[in-house]
Image: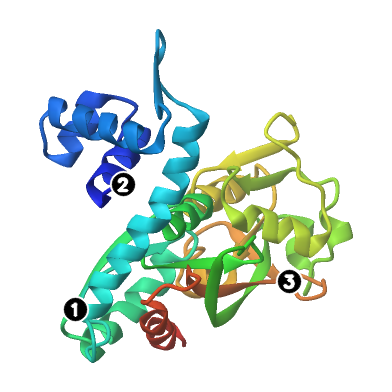
């Protein structure tokens, strides 16, 4: 006897919410019905999948392994349904697209109207989040594709190139570096560095492009911003220097600010913008069409 998709769905919801009551609400069933489904799953697997600890519900080793496989099974099942419904009609109906915050405000306003004109039957659902959570969404079937930046660990994923986005040095307008035509990595070493918070891949991309060490969250010489607009305000206030993607600058992010932007004198100071999807996904061909629509 094999587990049913319903039982696997109950298990993934239980792993997400860590509560039978909350998982039952998310599944739109009664708590006894969800508990019975989990009990039947445990009977089929021959081992418990959850332990009820004093601190809350905890997955067993068998349960954790089952959750990882259940996510892939459910995602592939959704792929099967979506592919059948969209056969011969690419980019029609629902398509869930993730996008990172350092791309969304600058690329979407240009690309979305073009996409809507080309595919009027497309119902695009957008989720803005950091790269690690978007990649997890791709692998578990929560997203069909994601607009992210490389380099990044792309194990289990495929992707299509959209554009290369140059990384630029950003300094206060009255900073000595603002008088230079280009800024070298050596000139930035020792400056108070303002970076995006951990989790934003732009942070790693910029530091790697210049060969600079990460100041780290506990370093008194480093400041962190939660968004690019906040970062620009911090640089303009004279708190330090930073890096900005060229697409953000072209979109007017530094307009009317006290920030000077200069090219970096480094080898390939850029990030690669791509659309990624889970390897083997039936929506891969549609993701490639999206990449074409997003290209400049």
Left or right: residue 47 compared with residue 120 = right
Q: Residue at x 61, y 63 (%)?
A: 155
Mark earlier in primary sequence (2, 1): 2
How far across and how far down the image is residue 76, in percent? 36, 64
Between marks 2 and 1 in the image, the one whose residue lies nearer the viewer:
2
Q: Is residue 180 above or below residue 91?
A: above
Q: Which residue is mark 1?
A: 85
Up-down relation of residue 224 to residue 177 (above or below): above
Q: Nearer the viewer, residue 170 or 216?
A: 216
What number is the disc on residue 41? none
Residue 146 appears in which quarter of the rendering?
bottom left
Residue 157 sits above or below residue 12 on the image: below
Q: Secondary structure at mark 3?
A: loop
- Marks 3 and 2 sit apart, C-alpha to C-alpha, by 50 Å
Pick whichever, 200 or 31, lies toward us. Answer: 31
Label for residue 269? 3
Label 1: element kind: helix
- The CA span between labels 1 and 3 is 43 Å
Mark 3 and mark 2 in contact? Answer it, CB < 8 Å: no
**Which one is in front in this view, the residue at disc 3 or the one at disc 2?**
2
Instruction: Tell me, yes or no, if residue 204 can be seen here.
Output: yes
- Which residue appears at 20% of the width and 29% of the height? 36
Which residue sits at x=25%, y=73%? 82
Name the residue that disc number 2 marks: 3
Could you give the CA–CA distance between mark 2 and mark 1, rounded to whole angstroms? 25 Å
Crowding at dot 1, Cα within 10 Å, few <14 / some 14-19 / many 20+, comes out as few
> Which residue is rendered at x = 49% and y = 57% of the image?
135
Q: Is residue 143 visible?
A: no
In which quadrant of the rendered view does residue 86 lie?
bottom left
């Amino acid at each position: 006897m094999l587990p049913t998709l319903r039982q696997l769905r109950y298990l993934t919801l239980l792993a997400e919410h860590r509560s039978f009551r909350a998982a039952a609400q998310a599944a739109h069933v009664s708590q006894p019905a969800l508990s019975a489904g989990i009990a039947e799953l445990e009977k089929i697997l021959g081992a418990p999948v959850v332990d009820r600890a004093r601190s809350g519900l905890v997955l067993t080793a068998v349960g954790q392994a089952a959750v990882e496989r259940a996510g892939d099974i459910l995602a592939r099942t959704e792929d099967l349904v979506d592919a059948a419904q969209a056969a011969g009609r690419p980019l029609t109906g629902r398509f869930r697209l993730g996008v990172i915050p350092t791309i969304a405000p600058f690329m979407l306003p240009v690309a979305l109207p073009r996409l809507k004109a080309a595919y009027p039957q497309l119902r695009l659902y957008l989720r803005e989040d950091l790269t690690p959570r978007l990649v997890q969404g791709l692998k578990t079937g929560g997203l069909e594709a994601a607009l992210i930046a490389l380099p990044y660990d792309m194990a289990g994923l495929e992707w299509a190139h959209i554009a290369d986005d140059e990384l630029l040095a950003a300094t206060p307008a009255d900073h000595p570096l603002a008088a230079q035509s280009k800024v070298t990595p050596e000139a930035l070493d020792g400056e108070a560095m303002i970076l995006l918070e951990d989790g934003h891949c732009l942070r790693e991309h910029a530091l790697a492009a210049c060969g600079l060490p990460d100041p780290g969250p506990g370093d008194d010489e480093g400041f962190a911003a939660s968004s690019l607009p906040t970062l620009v305000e911090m640089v303009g206030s004279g708190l330090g220097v930073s890096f900005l993607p060229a697409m953000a600058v072209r979109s007017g992010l530094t307009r009317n600010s006290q920030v000077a932007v200069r090219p970096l004198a480094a080898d390939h100071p850029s990030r690669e913008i791509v659309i990624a999807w889970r390897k083997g996904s039936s929506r891969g061909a549609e993701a490639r069409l999206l990449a074409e629509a997003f290209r400049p």
